[in-house]
Amino acid sequence: MNDSTLFRIVYDSVCVLPGGHASELQLQDILEVARRFNLESRITGALRCDRVYFLQVLEGPRGPVVSTMARIQRDGRHTRVNIIEAAPLARRDFADWSMALVPDHSATMARLTNPDLLDFRPATGAQAANALRAMLASHRA
């Protein structure tokens, strides 16, 4: 597998920021850095944060995605990083976003319209990507 093979990593983790959750300002800081870096590295994806738990999909060339995940795993703002999937990908699920955010209120609204998303913990990368796309679509509506 070469460094430019399209690759996806999906993980979840627990926020350990002061106060026990991510504030809107902290999320915006995370996104600003991620979007700038991801544009340069040709990475796309989505981040869901319900203020305590993170769920993120990273997709792009294998080398940059793996390097980004290694950096994320060392990030002290979260713990219990659980990699749900790390595998080649046929096509991007989030090609339009350097990093889409599915914030707490979007996740809550999606849960109201789709009870299957209540207490969502994906078993597969595809399940995570599909749920995040549905949440983003409900946020736009």
Image (spheres, rainbow, N blue to C red):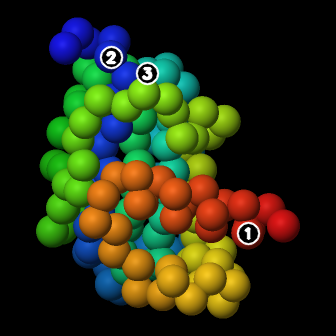
| Viewer-proximal residue among 23 and 9 | 9
Question: Which of the 4 image quarters holds residue 138?
Answer: bottom right
Q: Which residue is drawn at 74% across and 67% down?
A: 139
Separation (CA) of disc 3 from disc 2: 13 Å
Upstream in sequence: badge 3 or badge 1: 3
Crowd band around label 2 with a 10 angstrom C-alpha radius: few (<14), some (14–19), many (20+): some
The residue lying at 23 percent from left, 30 percent from top is 67
Please state which of the two labelled residues, at mark 3 or mark 1, is closer to the viewer.
1
Query: Does label 1 or label 2 sit earlier along the sequence?
Result: 2
Q: Name the residue under label 1.
A: 138
Residue shown at the point (47%, 70%) measured from the top left: 49
Q: Is mark 1 on a helix, strand or loop?
A: helix
Q: Mark 3 points at which residue?
A: 41
For marks 3 and 2, give the one nearer the viewer.
2
Query: Residue 117 at what x, y percent from top left?
Result: 50, 80
Q: Mark 2 points at which residue?
A: 5
**Residue 72 vertical position relative to residue 3 in the rendered view, above or below:** below
Residue 99 position (above or below residue 43): below
Residue 80 locus on image (x, y percent): 15, 68
- Counting residues from the start of the chain, the first of labels 3 and 2 encountered is 2
Three-letter amino acid code of the residue under disc 1: Ser
Q: Is mark 2 on a helix, strand or loop?
A: loop
Q: Foreground: 120 or 81?
A: 120
Q: Which amino acid does label 3 sit on?
A: Ser
Residue plotted at (34% across, 74% down): 121
Say which amino acid is labelled 2. Answer: Thr
| Residue 33 pos. (x, y %) | 48, 41
Q: In 3D space, how far apart are the residues under numbered discs 1 and 2 (Cα atoms)?
A: 31 Å
| Quarter containing the C terminus | bottom right
